[in-house]
Image: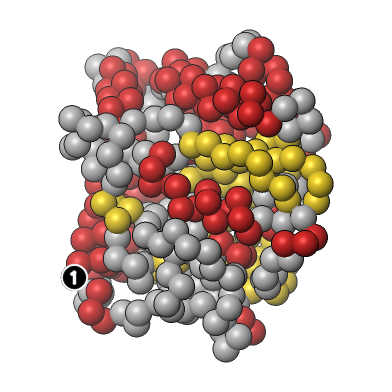
Amino acid sequence: MCILRYSIGLASLAVATGFIFNHNRPRQTSNTFLGNTRSWQPLASSAALEDDVDTNINGASESALIGTNQSAKREKKLAVLLCPAQFCVPVDYENLLDTIQEQANVNVVATRVAPLPRTEWIKVAKQLPTKNFLDANLSVKVTLDWYFTAMESALTELFAEGGEDLEVCIIGHSIGGWVARAYLGGLSGSSTAVYRLGKERIKSLITIGTPHISPESALVDQTRGLLREIASSEDCSSQSLSERGVTVTCVGSSSLPGKLITTDVEEIIAATSYLPLVGRLGADVKGDGIVPTELAFMESPARRVEIDKCLESGNAVRHAHVLPTPWNLIDGSAASIKLPEDIVWYGSPGVLSQWLQYIE
């Protein structure tokens, strides 16, 4: 079904970037993040590159912050809930959350990933034979109730662990970003005690590699109306979330162009993702290989963090660090396939440091 096309594109991108052209790419520095649980110091080897890399926030360019002062951590207690990408599982984000807990400039006392084995995504398939699916008019509340339940399960644990004065930051990767946005905007229809407490305690939302817009120019509505419902909901707008005390930061990559006529297989694969989503290709259409840059940001007052390249290696910033395995239904919680270490994504050293300061 169209809502699952993301996984096919990511799989193709992984084959092209990780296994065909890996020998043409410079190796990353020794303190590589993927598959390495030891600590690293942000931007330790990026001095030669940092002058060339800017973070674009709400249309204005500013230098990416360098380093993290551990002694300056604020006293408030923060928990981080990560909403995963399609078919990704909690273990895929362990290293990222460990690094956030160590490097953030706030006291991160607990972290959780919404407990979603890949088998849960099969529940979307029950919408296949419906008229709403064919008409691209799926209901967020009905279609994604299982995802919202997983979020509340994780929030329950975080509130119990963190105590009365705990605040929460939600990080949403890819699809997880707009699902979290829908939850915060009330589209889940939840009225649980956990939801009510979350309205008081959730103070920030960060989306990484998340499409936030379903433009009219798109060749096909791959979410079958889900993203359109969220984007058109006033309660899910960044202005509404801000008025309720939720700071929104959107992080997107502009590293990879999409071209159909090229010898670069990665650019061809990016084009097959960008073209259906925005309805065109050209020099101005770039992204992270899956999500075009122009779709990765919400309207102001949401922060716009546009990342051009990794500060440490200079490599392009891609959509993900793993290849999901939707076919592995026997062990739905088994780790996805790790991509080669020199494939940089939003959680890599030299990239994470460009948005880490917004975990608050």
Residue at position x 74%, y 40% in the image: 77
| Residue 223 shows in the view | yes
Residue at position x 33%, y 38% in the image: 87
332 over 303 or under it: above or below = above
Q: How is the image coloured?
A: secondary structure
Location of mark 1 (residue): 20
Q: Considering depth in this image, is 216 or 248 the residue closer to the camera? A: 248
| Residue 216 shows in the view | no
Residue 181 in percent (x, y) is at: 59, 34
- Looking at the image, which residue sits at the far bottom? 48
263 over 248 or under it: above or below = below
Q: Identify the image quadrant of residue 57.
A: bottom right
Q: Considering depth in this image, is 301 or 309 the residue closer to the camera? A: 309
Q: Identify the image quadrant of residue 197.
A: top right
Residue at position x 28%, y 39% in the image: 334
Task: Using a 10 Å C-alpha cutoff, classify the residue at mark 1 as few (fewer than 14 neighbours), some (14 to 19) or many (20 or more).
Answer: few
348 over 291 or under it: above or below = below
Answer with left or right where residue 5 lies relative to residue 237. Answer: left
Residue at position x 25%, y 66% in the image: 18
Q: Considering depth in this image, is 119 or 165 the residue closer to the camera? A: 165
Q: Secondary structure at mark 1?
A: helix
Answer with left or right where residue 153 lies relative to residue 2. Answer: right
Which amino acid type is marked by label 1?
A: Ile
Residue 14 in percent (x, y) is at: 26, 59
